[in-house]
Image (tube, rainbow, N blue to C red):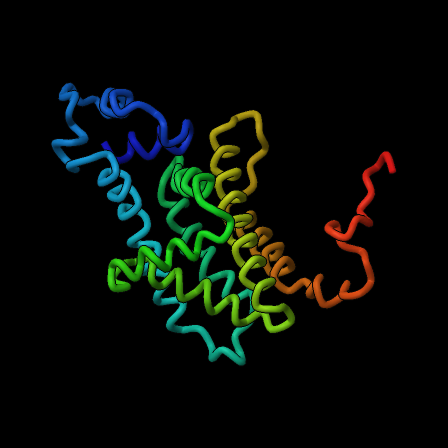
Amino acid sequence: LLLAAERLIATRGFDVPSREIIAEAGHRNKSAIQYYYGSRDEMVEAIWYLHGAPVNLYRAEIVAALPPADEVTTRELIDAYLVPLARELGSYKPSYWARFNERQLLLSPLHFVADLQIELIMRDNAHPLYVLFLLYKQTEQHLTQLTREEAVHRVALTFRFIMHGLATWERDSEDESTPMIELSDFVDDLAGLAVSMLEAPSYLRASSGHGHGIGDGSFETMDG
């Protein structure tokens, strides 16, 4: 039931009818979701735990082994986020986990970490997502070339970029007409791009007083 729900939500969105999930799973009981999980929300939570718990357990091991804050590299922080995800994707053929997360991100604000922090406080930080939250904050603090506001924005964009990239790889892996890239090669390329995004210099500091921002009226379209 969980795998059927994950697959349908990942490919069609969270509004897929419960009856279709139940039918896809081969259940005759029309109340199977309520019977096994109590509610649809609880079923979605169970889907997350199916993958999220082992992902973040592995991530916790990687984070614990990271060098001190003044020695850690951007690539090591990115790998701590990306490698556990990739390992989970590689465990399923096909995988829907990245697409499931992508669907959740589509329903979340850009700076979704603020909502995550509220949820963790409600759970007394006793949740596998706590290690992810700590990694987010560590990555933000690592970006010393940026203002705090920029760092928060940059990390949110970069981590979303990674998840959307993995979701695209999942979709392509099911399309026989698309030339496939090995997951390990794709992840290495994705990590390199993510590092470049995070390490790019501060736009605010570089453009301060020069009037080259979109918001200052100087941005022009191709039509002039």
188 up-or-down from 43: above or below:
below
Tell me where residue 71 appears, x and y as whole percent: 53, 79
Q: Nearer the viewer, residue 149 or 161?
A: 149
Quadrant housing the N terminus: top left
Q: Is residue 149 left or right of residue 107?
A: right
- Residue 73 occupies which quadrant of the picture? bottom right
Q: Is residue 139 in view?
A: yes
* Apparent side of residue 4 relative to residue 165 in the rendered image (left or right): left
Name the spot of residue 182 as percent of width and height, x first.
53, 44
Residue at 37%, 55% in the rendered image: 116
The quadrant in which residue 81 appears is bottom left
Q: Residue 120's x, y, as percent?
A: 31, 59
Residue at position x 55%, y 65% from top?
A: 75
Identity of the residue drawn at 43% across and 40% down: 107
The C terminus, quarter of image: top right
Instruction: Say which of 41 and 27 sits in front.
Output: 41
